[in-house]
């Protein structure tokens, strides 16, 4: 008995990639579809987002649009992103600047990353102007 397999088509749709392979085994037609496991799981930041809705808690939408505040946030972000030793989580922390005061929020990989990001912000914004609310992932 002869086995013949042909790799089929990659179909992109609705944000999912589906790899279909079709083959013939004897007279039976075999069709299999595989969906990447990561594509089927949605990110869930619900618990983190709920923490940030406490009364008086700074949120990203409270970023001031003054040129000075935007420039300060930009400088801090550049300093963090330019440090390739930091994790992707660290590169994506929230930086909220209002009237020259900085709030750092979001998860990082280690206590060391939390301290290093805080130090970068203090170096740029100044002593006493940074609140470091970064959390270390467990």
Image (cartoon, grey):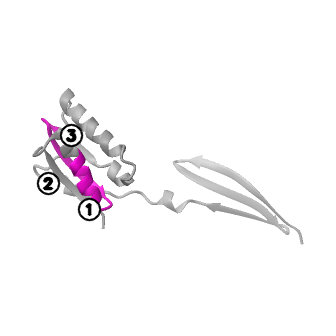
- Specify the farthest residue to the right: 1
Q: Would residue 66 be seen by someone viewing this image from the given angle? A: no
The numbered dot on residue 94 is none
The numbered dot on residue 111 is 1
Q: What number of labels is visible?
A: 3
User: Mark 3 and mark 1: span between their CA atoms?
Assistant: 20 Å
Q: Name the element at disc 2.
A: loop
The numbered dot on residue 124 is 3
Residue displayed at 85% across by 69% down: 26
- State which region is magenta: 98-120
Quadrant of the image for the N terminus?
A: bottom right
Residue 109 is situated, as x and y percent measured from the top left of the image, at 33, 60
Q: Would residue 63 be seen by someone viewing this image from the given angle? A: yes
Residue displayed at 31% across by 45% down: 80
The mark closer to the camera, 2 or 1, is 1
Residue displayed at 36% across by 43% down: 82
| Residue 98 position by quadrant | top left
Please state which of residues 66 and 78 is positioned toward the viewer in this rendering: 78
Q: Which residue is mark 2?
A: 54
Residue 30 is situated, as x and y percent measured from the top left of the image, at 74, 65
- Sequence-wise, which precedes: disc 3 or disc 2? 2
Q: Residues within 10 Å of mark 1 (few under 14, many from 20)?
A: few
Contact between marks 3 and 1 (CB within 8 A): the answer is no
Q: Name the element at disc 3.
A: helix
Quadrant of the image for the C terminus?
A: bottom left
Q: Is residue 94 above or below residue 66?
A: below
- Sequence-wise, which precedes: disc 2 or disc 1? 2
Q: Is residue 125 above or below residue 3?
A: above
Q: Residues within 10 Å of mark 3 (few under 14, many from 20)?
A: some
| Residue 100 position by quadrant | top left
């Amino acid at each position: 008995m002869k086995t013949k397999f042909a790799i089929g088509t990659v179909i992109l749709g609705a944000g999912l990639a589906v790899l279909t392979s079709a083959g013939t085994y004897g007279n039976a037609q075999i069709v299999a579809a595989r969906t990447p496991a990561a594509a089927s799981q949605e990110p869930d930041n619900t618990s983190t987002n709920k923490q940030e809705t406490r009364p008086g808690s700074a949120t990203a939408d409270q970023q001031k649009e003054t040129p000075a505040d935007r420039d300060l946030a930009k400088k801090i972000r550049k300093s963090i992103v330019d440090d390739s030793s930091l994790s992707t989580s660290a590169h994506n922390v929230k930086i909220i600047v209002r009237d020259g005061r900085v709030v750092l929020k979001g998860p990082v990989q280690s206590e060391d990353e939390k301290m290093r990001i805080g130090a970068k912000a203090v170096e740029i914004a100044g002593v006493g102007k940074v609140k470091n609310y970064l959390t270390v992932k467990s």
